[in-house]
Image (tube, grey):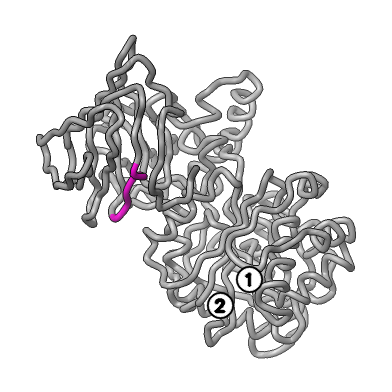
Amino acid sequence: MAENGIIPTVMCGGSGSRLWPLSRAQLPKPFVELPAGGTLLQQTFAGLAGLAPEKVIAICAAEHQANVRAIFRLSGLAAELVVIAEPLARNTAPAAAVAARFALERFGADATLALLPADHVVKDRPEFCRALVRAAAAAGSQRLAVLGIRPDSPSDQYGYIKAGTKGSEEWCEVASFIEKPDLQNAQKMIAAGGHYWNAGVFVARADVLSQEFVAHAPPIADIAAALEVPVSGDWSPDAKSYAAFPNISIDYAVAEKTTRAALVADVDAGWSDVGDWHSFAQLIPNAGGSNRATTGSSQFVSCTNCASFSTTDRTIAVIGLEKAVVVDTADALLVLGPQAAAQAGAIYRQLVDAGDLAALSPPYEQRPWGRYWVLASGPGFKLKRVEVNPGARLSLQSHDRRSEHWTVVTGTMSATVGDKMFDMKVEESCHVPRQSKHRLANCTDKPAAVIELQLGDYLGEDDIRRYEDDYQRP
């Protein structure tokens, strides 16, 4: 292990409800792209550099396993990644118990896990890493360490931790965990002092974490203990066993019951859980005055503290509003009033119940190498825009029933067609005959994209033969 002994354990779950329509059921919040570029998960991985970890564990849905590995490579973090692929979502308590079980088998009882959400923003990552090192020191005293964030204002959007008796220079006892209060009580707690936002970050030795589940959540402990951990590589736990886990958070299952909690308090790292659109709007650059926008096509007239976020090239005009957020995607438009941020989840659930595809999947297909959009289709043809991440490549593949024609529209793309390999720049094209082996790769550090025209009697995504693949797909 690294000198500080910490194994960051990044939990990449979520339903996609809080930041709909940018996030979806098939594209949870950790995979959402930020206004400045990159995803929340990529930022989380990159921010661990200050710990210099030798190993990182990521816990994610099985269908996101390849994407998590691709994002990890983009983060540039010099560590070995091991992925625990959950067969179904069961909240943070089962994920933590499974991580502890995994660490006990792979790394030993004294392995120190830092359980980290994958979808939070931390502006001062070095300070955050220093707080994790302090928490690891507390964990070494057989404690379950938690981080308490210094609040910059009263908020009814976060849970709080009340500090208790001093335990050492690094930590104090936890007097109590407090669920999200109303604003009046939040103001009282901030005025009283000694209360901190609960960041949902836990640091503990693998054996201590396992013992806490045995003591406070025996059914979870029993299921985790019965799971068979492979001796090497990633881990896909048994689906039938996993389904028996209750759906419960680690806060409810363990943290609020334990007598071994240690608070590392007053962490001042510019933290936000980006839990709604109004907090996400703070990441959007200023568009002039108090308003924010992601595109120069946004115009504000007689508006105060408004924001627009768009993934399209449409012009957005906002007139006469205050503290409103406008979110525009290719297939959905959301307009939020000043007090409506928490209701985005309600409209998401309403759309899910109605079977609306805009709640389930994004208007593009995410792949570990990048993504693609279907621009048009009809009998015998399909037109796509294919974006390949810097340093990524598609599998070496062929198709039995279609040919393809590529034209580069952004960046430089490296192409393999048959036994030929060559680079293509903007406006350059090539033809891929039916049944020929081919591959696209972006060998640069900048985005690259092609327009792909498919022609054939069958254009389904299952007409593919893979010969080589960086992501071990069948």
> What residue type is disc 1 on?
Leu
Residue 169: % across, % down: 65, 90
Q: Is residue 104 visible?
A: yes
In the picture of the structure, the residue carrying the numbered disc 2 is 131
Q: In whole angstroms, how far apart are the C-alphas of marks 2 and 1?
A: 8 Å
Residue 48: % across, % down: 47, 70
Residue 204: % across, % down: 70, 75
Q: Residue at x 33, y 28 (%)?
A: 318
Q: Residue at x 76, y 71 (%)?
A: 209
Residue 63: % across, % down: 56, 43
Say which quadrant the N terminus sits in: bottom right
Res 452 → quadrant: top left
Q: Is residue 303 visible?
A: no
In the picture of the structure, the residue carrying the numbered disc 1 is 147
How crowded is the residue under tag 1: few (<14 C-alpha within 10 Å), some, or many (20+)?
A: many
Of the pair 131 and 338, the residue shown nearer to us: 131
Of the pair 337 and 354, the residue shown nearer to us: 354
Assess whether mark 1 and mark 2 are in contact (beta carbons under 8 angstroms): yes
Of the pair 414 and 370, the residue shown nearer to us: 414
Q: Which residues are magenta?
A: 391-396
